[in-house]
Amino acid sequence: MEGEQLQGCYTGIDFLSRLADGETIPIGRSAVIIGGGNTAMDAARTAKRLGAHVSIVYPRTQEEMPARIEELHHALEEEIELN
């Protein structure tokens, strides 16, 4: 994907793994998560807890998201925006 090499851009697994390993990742005021799976939900909720306004971007409907329904509900409860 164009721009994936930019500073502050991570894959979901890389972002979560680095944090789990104790690395400090600077989080800006906002974060955009691209995807609709469980990793995307985990990354979104983690970024939210680190203080960012978080938006998830997924090119299909909510019903078509591959994330477990519980994961999606938890993200919505944490006021993560879905686009």
Image (cartoon, rainbow, N blue to C red):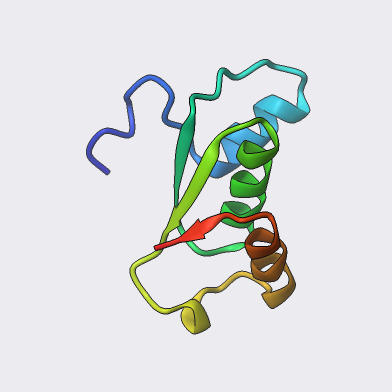
Which corner quadrant of the image does residue 17 belong to? Answer: top right
**Position above or below: 24 against 72:** above
Indicate the position of residue 11 as horizontal and vertical percent values: 49, 39
Who's the residue at 55% across and 24% down the image?
27
Q: Position of residue 15 (x, y in %)?
A: 59, 33
The quadrant of the image that shows the C terminus is bottom left
Work out whether residue 21 or residue 62 is closer to the camera in this orientation and state it: 62
Q: Residue 5's spot in the image, x, y percent?
A: 33, 26
Residue drawn at the location 70% of the way across and 65% of the way down: 71
Q: What residue do we see at 56% from left, 18% from top? A: 26
Q: How many marks?
A: 0
Name the side, left or right, on which 13 lies relative to 20: left
Q: Identify which residue, 10 or 49, lies in the foreground.
A: 49
Q: Which residue ends up furthest to the bottom in the rendered image?
A: 63
Rendering coords of residue 68 (x, y %)? 68, 73
User: Which quarter of the rendering shows the N terminus?
Assistant: top left
Figure check: 11 above or below 34? above
28 or 13: nearer the eye? 28
